[in-house]
Image (spheres, helix red, strand yellow):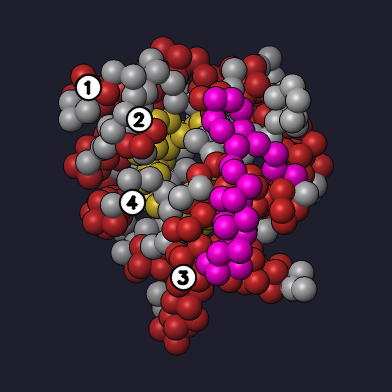
Amino acid sequence: MAARVNGVHPAISRPLKAGVFAPIPSFFLPDSEDLDIPAFETHVVRIASAGVGPLIAGSMGEAIHLSHAERLVLIRAARKALDAAGLPDVPLIVGTGAASTRETLELTAEAARAGADYAIVITGGYFAGALAGNHAALKAFFTEVAEKSPIPVIIYNYPGASGGIDLDSDLITELAMECPNICGVKLTCGNVGKLTRIADAVSGSAFTSTYPRKNPIAPFLVLGGFIDFLTPSAFANGHGAITGLGNVSPYAIRKLFDLSEAARTDLSILPEAQRLQGIIARADYTIAKTSIVGTKYLLQKLYGYGGTTRKPLPPISPVAAQALWEHPHTQALVTLERQLSGKAQ
């Protein structure tokens, strides 16, 4: 890999490829709430070793609870851990969205210097009343960030974390066409029709030749924010998903992605993809309802680390935790993950 000299981020050499990605939780020590770096490094390597890409400082990573300095610590720790594990080609996607355009650009530049290969940016929701539905203002925000970012930018559309701001397919398609440093979108709005429209617009050689990316190894990817419609999205020319479920079951979601892609050219594979999609979709629905604390609880239960969130996010109650673990959707996923990871018990 090219070295970073004097804090300058070189041309990226870790391609962004279609696939499945997991927004990595930020782990905290129980008493101090300081970052638990050993747990974080262990988890990043566990996920990447299963063929799932890590995303640092996203919603699941409680980015809103992290200082700038802490984000940089996590980026450097992730890169160091991946390199030490023999995974130097795994790219790092890092959340850099903030309330203002100015701070977003500062965070993005800092992340790039620390080792981020790609930024994923959400709109700040504090002034959602003025921004929601304001096509010109939202377009100006992403255009400026993309033009000034030293690394390619992924649009993050998550109304639940941005005061209800929901980017429509027309705006996202315009940004894809007009901003060559934008390399994708994550749709945590769960709108399958929106995904279909955007994927259709950016698929094929006509888009690639007419609207080339600034960096040819950073193509425009259309990614779901949930894993429960991965197989249907593959047939609509989607490119995968960024999903919190990847933390709990990386082997299962990677297998689902591979089967779904293969089924596009060999329909005999489709029934098995559909079977896995059913198991994973039900688990995604059940586990997602418990949010970050549920995912961390399951990691603690399965792998011995996870812990809790930073205050003021409350921990999961013992009753809810037991119900989550014993739920048949969770148990079916755990069984599948153990089978695919070679750790069936």
Image quarter hosting the N terminus: top right
Which tag, 4 or 2, sits closer to the chain's start? 2
Location of mark 1 (residue): 129
Q: How crowded is mark 2: few (under 14 residues within 10 Å), some or many (20 or more)?
A: some
Kindly state the secondary structure of the residue where label 2 is placed.
loop
Question: Is there a contact, CB below 8 Å, between mark 1 and mark 2?
Answer: no
User: Alpha-carbon distance for marks 1 and 4?
Assistant: 22 Å
Q: Is residue 222 above or below residue 183?
A: below
Looking at the picture, which amino acid does disc 1 mark? Gly
Location of mark 3 (residue): 277
Image quarter hosting the C terminus: bottom right
Location of mark 2 (residue): 162
Location of mark 4 (residue): 190
Q: Magenta span covers which residues?
A: 305-331
Q: Can residue 98 be seen in this view?
A: yes
> At which x and y percent is residue 46?
72, 51
